[in-house]
Amino acid sequence: MAPSPSSRTKVFISYSHADKEWLDRLKRHLKPMVREGRLDCWDDTRIQPGADWQQEIRHALDAAQVAVLLISADFFASDFIATDELPPLLAAAQAEGVRVLPVIISASRFARTPNLARFQAANSPDRPLDEMPPAEQEKVLDRLAHTIESIVDPQ
């Protein structure tokens, strides 16, 4: 049974482990809202030793209100992302209004992937984060954090 929209409260971050530095940078931008209890951010670093990691990911996917996709060639190369994360996220976006927020961190096939390119990215696929100066990267991540905040905590 699919969760009701009101049970979707998490921000799910999908990324390739090769891009962990970008995950860490994004989490720094989200940390104030997490600390204030206004945001429940989930990524696979929250999986504890001994946990059924596939079940943990499924539960987090089922609770996602927002899905942040850290897009790179490594993201597209991940079989797990392609088969286990994207299908339920895209289905939930279609059926339940889950917001999908792609962030283009490096050159990839994003623009040639219609089921993802239909979602407005946080930055242009022509200007991936890794081609921007650090100050511009931070502005994109700050805007993304603001967008997430407006979705999960509208006031």
Image (cartoon, helix red, strand yellow):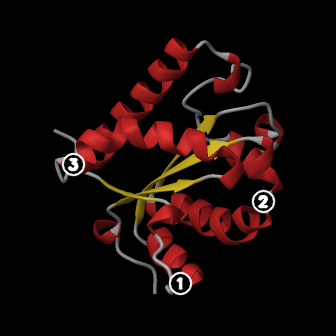
Q: Which of marks 2 and 3 is nearer the N terminus?
A: 3
Nearest to the observer: residue 134 or residue 120: 134
Of the residues shown, which amino acid type is indicated by label 2?
Ser
Quarter of the picture holding the C terminus: top left
Q: How far apart are marks 1 and 3 (CA)?
A: 26 Å
Q: Which of marks 1 and 3 is nearer the N terminus?
A: 3
Query: Marks 3 and 1: in contact by CB < 8 Å?
Result: no
Residue 23, position in %: x, y? 53, 45
Q: Earlier in the sequence, mark 2 or mark 1?
A: 1
Residue 12, position in %: x, y? 47, 58
Q: How many marks?
A: 3
- Is residue 75 visible in the rendered image? The answer is yes
Q: In this view, does 123 lie above or below 72?
A: above
Q: Quadrant of residue 3?
A: bottom left
Q: How far apart are marks 2 and 1 (CA)?
A: 18 Å
Nearest to the observer: residue 112 or residue 17: 17
Residue 51, position in %: x, y? 49, 85
Q: Which residue has dot 2 on it?
A: 78
Of the residues shown, which amino acid type is indicated by label 1?
Gln
Instruction: Name the mark on residue 35.
Output: 3
Q: How far apart are marks 2 and 3 (CA)?
A: 31 Å
Mark 3 burial class by Cα count in 10 Å: few <14, some 14-19, many 20+ = few
Q: Is mark 3 on a helix, strand or loop?
A: helix
Q: Which residue has dot 1 on it?
A: 55
99 relative position to 34: left or right: right
